[in-house]
Structures are given as C-alpha cells and as structure tokens.
Image (cartoon, helix red, strand yellow):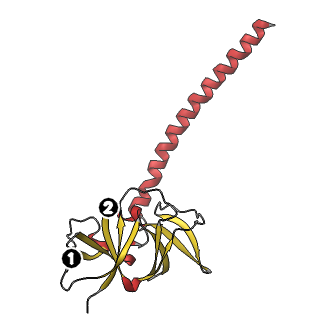
Amino acid sequence: MAEKVITFHLGGQVYALPIERVQEIQQIVRFAEVPDVSPAILGMVNLRGDVIPAVDLRTIVGIPPAEFTIDTPMIICRTADGAVAVVVDAVDDVVDLPEGCLQPASAMHSLASRLLGVCRFEKGMVFLLDIDALLEPVELPDAEDVDAAPEEVTEVAKDVAVVTEDVDAAAAECVGADEAESEDVS
C-alpha cells in the first residue's frame, strides 16, 4: 500500500507531510503573541479549547517570511510534543506516494537532517518533511561559549563607558556655554 501525504507550497516549492501526522487544516486565525526568541514562533492559537503554538514554516525552512491573508492555511500537526499549527502558503491535496519514489535527501541539502526524503513527481520534486525534526528545540550554547561571553560583555561595557564619558563631557560643555550666554544677556 502506498504512503499518503499532504502536499503544500512554501515559496514556490512543493513540500509534504505524512498524512498520519496531520490532524486538520484550517484558515489562519489571530495569534496570541508570546515573548519568544525564535522568529518562527508566531504565537498561540485556541483550537477548540486547546491552546497550541503556531509556527511559520517558511522561517523554519529558511525562506523569507510572507504576509498572511485570510486565505493563508494552517496545518494542525500531531508531533511528539503535542499539536502545533504550521502556517504554509497553500495546501494542495492528499496524494499517494508512488512505490519506490522516495529517496534519501542529499547531505548537501540544508534540510537533509529534517527530511524523511525526496520524491520525484511528473511536476517536480516534493520534499517530505519530518515534523518532529523540524520543530526540535534550539540547542543551548556549549559551556565554552558561555565562558567566553563575559569577556565580550566586559569589552562592550568598556566601550559604552567611554562613549558615556564623552557624552557627559559634551553635555557639560553645552550647559557651560548656555550659562555663559545667559550671563551675557543679563
């Protein structure tokens, strides 16, 4: 039996997700903004009482963001960590992958570790995404990187102190000049 996938577009390229990972497709809704360092996190959405994160898949795969419209779709996916709303450009259809069409992604492809494979169709290539690998949390820096940071901060702080002294000196000169002018007027 052939594997079923749902195909969708991002920046002119066709991507797919295994159908068993897709819960439903909806039109975009308003996001409740949340403070986050990741530009891919758009916010949270209320899905019939369940609050789930919404992510911009364009940002995750390295495509510049696009403006959303009322017709922008969200694919609600089931991941290892729960449901997530994935915003895409357009949803195409559910298709059967032809037997033997799925090939491993080239290691040269920047998404290779986040792909289940690449499938060749008559109308072009379809990149089958691994939703769990795409949404893995950002790794924290190594301890060596953290140890180096205070030195860099110290250097920046010294530069800021010098600039602050220069600004204070310039401000004092201006105040002194203003006082001298007001004495000349009286």
Say if residue 170 shows up in the picture: yes
Circle 2: element type: loop
Give the distance between the C-alpha atoms of the residues marked 2 and 1, in whole angstroms. 22 Å
In this image, 174 relative to 24: left or right? right
Check disc 1 and report the residue beneath it: 104
Mark 2 crowd level (few <14, some 14–19, many ≥20, 10 Å Cα): few
Residue 185, given in percent of the width and then of the height, sits at 78, 7
Q: Residue at x 22, y 76 (%)?
A: 119
Q: Residue at x 58, y 34 (%)?
A: 164
- Mark 2 is on which residue type? Gly
Q: Residue 118 versus residue 168: which sits nearer the camera?
A: 118
First of labels 2, 1 by sequence position: 2
- When asked about the image quadrant of residue 80, the answer is bottom left
Residue 97, given in percent of the width and then of the height, sits at 25, 82
Check disc 2 and report the residue beneath it: 12
Mark 2 or 1, closer to the camera: 2
CB atoms at circles 2 and 1 under 8 Å apart? no
- Mark 1 is on which residue type? Pro
Residue 73, given in percent of the width and then of the height, sits at 46, 69
Q: Residue 119 versus residue 73: which sits nearer the camera?
A: 73
Which quadrant of the figure contains the N terminus? bottom left
